[in-house]
Image: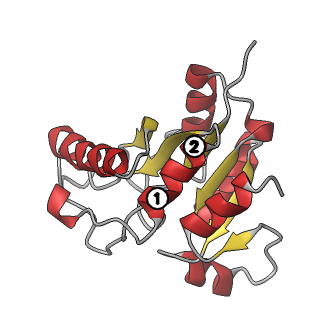
């Protein structure tokens, strides 16, 4: 089977600023400096980008699918304005107490993405800011990368012996990936 070159990205805390109060509207979705440029850089070097995100705000009733679609439409539009394309978005709508297989740290969303996009996960990076992102990547056989934005600094403090590559921002991680190192 042919495989595509993808980089998988967590959303909140990696592409956009996170909030303890959740991102509930397009107005609250604010890109982290350099993140949209990072997506364009990855695209320019032959990588497609997919977003893998837990969205428990749906289960909590903080927003609905229509609002999540509007938030993601804004993300798509702003990425496009910077020359980037997000090929696909995979989200878990379940709450933190769910037994679903799609909520990170479980690998379900990555496995679904791999099947639908024809991705070889052993050659695919997932960039996240939380320990659960790293766990999901490992559980799916993907290569985890941590960024210090969002919850990244806290993740580093709570797990000081991580052997995962760490970068300050998504843009720094993207520069590393496209440099072929």
Q: Residue furthest bottom?
A: 157
Give percent across and percent down for residue 164: 78, 67
Residue at the image position 35 percent from the left and 65 percent from the top:
31
Quarter assignment of residue 80: top left
Q: Which mark is residue 37?
A: 1
Look at the numbered disc 1 and give the secondary structure of its residue.
helix
Residue at the image position 42 percent from the left and 57 percent from the top:
36
Give percent across and percent down for residue 2: 73, 16
Neighbour class for label 1 at 10 Å: few (<14), some, many (≥20)? many
Q: How many marks?
A: 2
Look at the numbered disc 2 and give the secondary structure of its residue.
helix
Q: How is the image coloured?
A: secondary structure
Give percent across and percent down for residue 169: 56, 72
Viewer-closest of 106 and 125:
125
Query: Which quadrant, please, contains the N terminus?
Result: top right
Q: CA distance from mark 2 to mark 1?
A: 10 Å
Residue 159 seen anywhere in this rendered image of the structure: yes
Q: Please give the residue where the numbered disc 2 appears in the rendered image.
A: 44
Viewer-closest of 20 and 59:
20
């Amino acid at each position: 089977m042919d495989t595509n070159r993808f980089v998988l990205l967590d959303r909140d805390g990696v592409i956009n600023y996170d909030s303890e109060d959740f991102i509930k509207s397009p107005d609250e979705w604010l890109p982290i400096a350099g993140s949209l440029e990072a997506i364009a850089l990855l695209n320019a070097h032959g990588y497609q980008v997919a977003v893998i995100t837990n969205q428990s705000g749906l289960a909590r009733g903080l927003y609905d699918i229509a609002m999540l679609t509007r938030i993601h439409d804004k993300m798509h539009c702003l990425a496009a304005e910077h020359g980037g394309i997000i090929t696909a978005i995979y989200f878990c709508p379940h709450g933190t107490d769910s037994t679903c297989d799609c909520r990170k740290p479980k690998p379900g969303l990555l496995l679904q993405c791999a099947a639908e996009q024809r991705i070889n996960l052993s050659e695919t990076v997932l960039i996240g800011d939380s320990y659960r992102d790293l766990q999901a990547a490992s559980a799916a056989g993907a290569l985890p990368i941590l960024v210090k934005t969002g919850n990244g600094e806290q993740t580093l403090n709570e797990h000081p012996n991580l052997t995962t590559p760490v970068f300050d921002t998504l843009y720094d991680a993207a520069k590393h990936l496209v440099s072929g190192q």
